[in-house]
Image (spheres, rainbow, N blue to C red):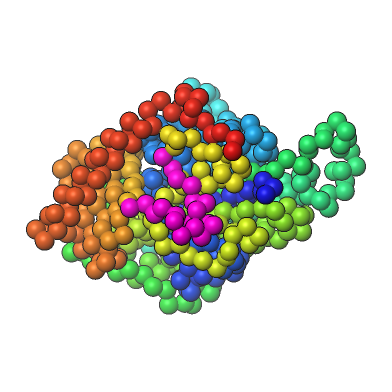
Amino acid sequence: MKRPNIILIITDQQRYETIAALGFPHVNTPHLDKLVNEGVAFSQCHVTAPSCGPSRASLFTGYFPHNSGALKNNDAWPRTWVQDLKDNGYYCVNIGKMHADPYNELHGFHERFVVENKQRRESELMWKGNPHIFEDEWDKALELRGFDRPEKPFYRDWPDTKERQGAYEWKLPDDLHPDAFVGDMAIRWIDKSPYATDNSKLMQWIDKDKQPSLGEEPLFLEIGFPGPHPPFDPVESYTKEYMEKDLPILPVTQEEMDAQPETLHSFRKRLTQRFADSIDFDPNASDEARKLQRAYYLANVTMIDESIGKILNRLEETGILEDSVVIFSSDHGDCLGDHGLVEKWTMYDSSVRVPLVVWSPDRYKGGRKVESLTQWFDIGPTILELAGLEPPAKMEAESLIPFLEDDPNAQEREYVFSEHAQDLMLQDLDHSLMVRNKRYKLVEYIGKDAGQLFDLEHDPDEVKDVWSSPDYSDVKTNLRKVLHEWFVTSTTKATGWWKDPAAKPKVK
């Protein structure tokens, strides 16, 4: 079969319960619903790290963070498998957010059009010795239109910011919203690319004799939306339907917060004092404030869904979609006030469980949901196999192709894992580790002799920690053993992968 175009769409901080067709009818997502209804949805996909940088580095290498070397945001990325696609005949383009470090490097792509965080400029070049602040494509567009990026101080100065829980109306022109901007930028690239069969103007000046492969090699197009990452800032017209809905929101009790480990108390304090991405956060927020936060978050999801619909329509109109595999997912979730916390960094399902949908009706039977435990970085070897490459034996991620092909012998993971290093927000620990199977989840805070344990069969909302319960002592002992053995053996397996020629994919 001909190697397909591969379209990878990644949002930032979109939790699992945000797509109507995945069982959350409170949100308006017709275009994502189409992908789910005609594709294969993985209902138990868990990220390898609950924050942007390490999660994405893990995906684009196929290794857990402690083996990729990117353990937290702003850690440098090693070589990615995008380079392998490029070396084997794919034309590779990134439009929007990747959160790769350094921001201004190609990381294997032929072209990158970078848009990074919504509410702050990226000064990483400056603190690494370069005198310039990194300006992305959005910064340039804003400046050309006479606007400044709405950064944290802009939102902090709103008179009622304390009651907003990070929810704000977008105040600039609608088309300059970062999610609309990335969607429009992707469509512009498609329209001007040699892959667009109706692009007669481009074909007039392309000398096909001198550029015989231009537009004929398969395409890998990664589109990264900056939202619904906070601040939760949708265009106001999208908010009305959600403010009128009765949205389900998990209650938070003082009893639950008091019972959490000290590491989470410290993290909550940082969230309320450090002027985090959500600008202001109150763990004891009113029902009205939490409703506003949830409504604006979902409104941003609907905005992104609309942009995805436009992109897919344009891909279809230009003929690119005809032989393509579309993959949609997000790099981690957001607690949105659940458990008395906001944003990511923790191992609750609202932070580590994400939607994952693969759409290619001509290749794979659609309308299916895979309940098997999967890891987010499994997308990597899946893409390599789609491209006709054999993932290296040392790669820790596992291809999802058997599940896509509905192979009855597809091997399900017994456990999934996640981890995060100490960083500016998560300070009261050395390292956090998570292991879960279908029934139990265990979290261990290294350096604190503390953790959490949840019986997901009886407590799917993860509000009753049984870490100290004698009734679960055997479960706790077994899961800690699994966790520790995984960490050691995974390090041994992956040692030296970044400089081992045998660890590069082979052509099938």
Is 116 situated left or right of 495 in this image?
right
At 70% from the left edge and 53% from the top edge, which residue is drawn? 323
Give the image location of residue 419, x and y in percent. 33, 43
Q: Is residue 412 magenta?
A: yes
Between 345 and 406, which is closer to the camera in this rendering?
406
Please say if 279 is above or below 24: above
Magenta portion: prevailing SS class: loop
Is residue 133 in sight in this rendering? yes
Is 319 situated left or right of 394 in this image?
right
- What is the span of residues highlighted in magenta in the rendered image? 396-414
Please say if 124 is above or below 407: above
Number of numbered callouts drawn: 0
At 29% from the left edge and 48% from the top edge, which residue is drawn? 434
Q: Which picture quadrant has residue 172?
A: bottom right
Between 234 and 224, which is closer to the camera in this rendering?
224
At 33% from the left edge and 42% from the top edge, which residue is drawn? 420
Is residue 152 in sight in this rendering? no
Q: Quadrant of the C terminus?
A: top right
Give the image location of residue 385, x and y in percent. 56, 44
At 55% from the left edge and 65% from the top edge, which residue is drawn? 36
Q: Which picture quadrant has residue 507?
A: top right
Q: Is residue 494 magenta?
A: no
Is 52 situated left or right of 234 in this image?
left
Residue lying furthest front: 409
Give the image location of residue 506, x and y in percent. 56, 33
Please say if 484 is above or below 253: above
Is 28 situated left or right of 280 in this image?
right
Between 461 and 34, which is closer to the camera in this rendering?
34
Give the image location of residue 475, x and y in percent. 18, 55
